[in-house]
Amino acid sequence: MFEVHLAPGADASDLLSQETLRSTQAQVMTLAEAKKVGFGGLPEPPPGRDVRLIAVAKRDAAWIHRALETSDAVGGFHVHEVDV
């Protein structure tokens, strides 16, 4: 699971390309959406920060990591290991 803090003024739809989403089946969610599908214990983002969570299979984590590192929409991100 990637916790992504969007850069100021960035559009969340620019985080990952459609090809990357299709190939990895990554799920990009708001915190509210993540809580609805069972991801609990998530802290609220700092005021004024827009956060998205990206759930992806471990085999594709390196691909998503590289995509986030090169995205202008990303202000910063953290990786969290999640057992399912």
Image (cartoon, helix red, strand yellow):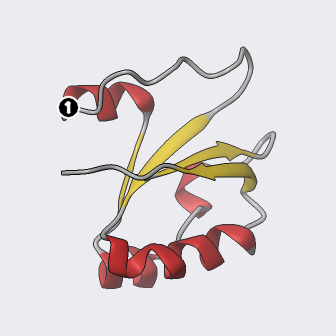
Count the numbered circles shown: 1
- Residue appearing at x 42%, y 29% in the figure: 31
Q: Residue at x 55, y 17 (%)?
A: 44
Residue type, numbered disc 1: Gly
Which residue matches tag 1? 38
Q: Does 84 sit left or right of 11 as displayed?
A: left
Which x, y percent locates residue 16? 53, 69
Q: Position of residue 42 (x, y in %)?
A: 44, 24
SS type, badge 1: loop
Q: Position of residue 49 (x, y in %)?
A: 71, 27
The front one of 73 and 40 is 40
Query: Pointer 1: residues within 10 angstroms few (<14), some, or many (20+)?
Result: few
Q: Which residue is at the front of the view, 21 or 4?
A: 4
Rendered location of residue 55, percent (x, y): 36, 56
Left or right: residue 58 compared with residue 66: left
In this rendered view, identify the residue nearer to me: 72 or 60. Answer: 60
Tell me if residue 2 comes above or below residue 51 in the rendering.
below
Using the image, determine if residue 50 lies above or below residue 46: below
Q: Residue at x 38, y 73 (%)?
A: 21
Q: Which residue is painted at 70% across and 18% down in the image?
A: 46
Determine whether 23 is above or below 77 in the image.
below
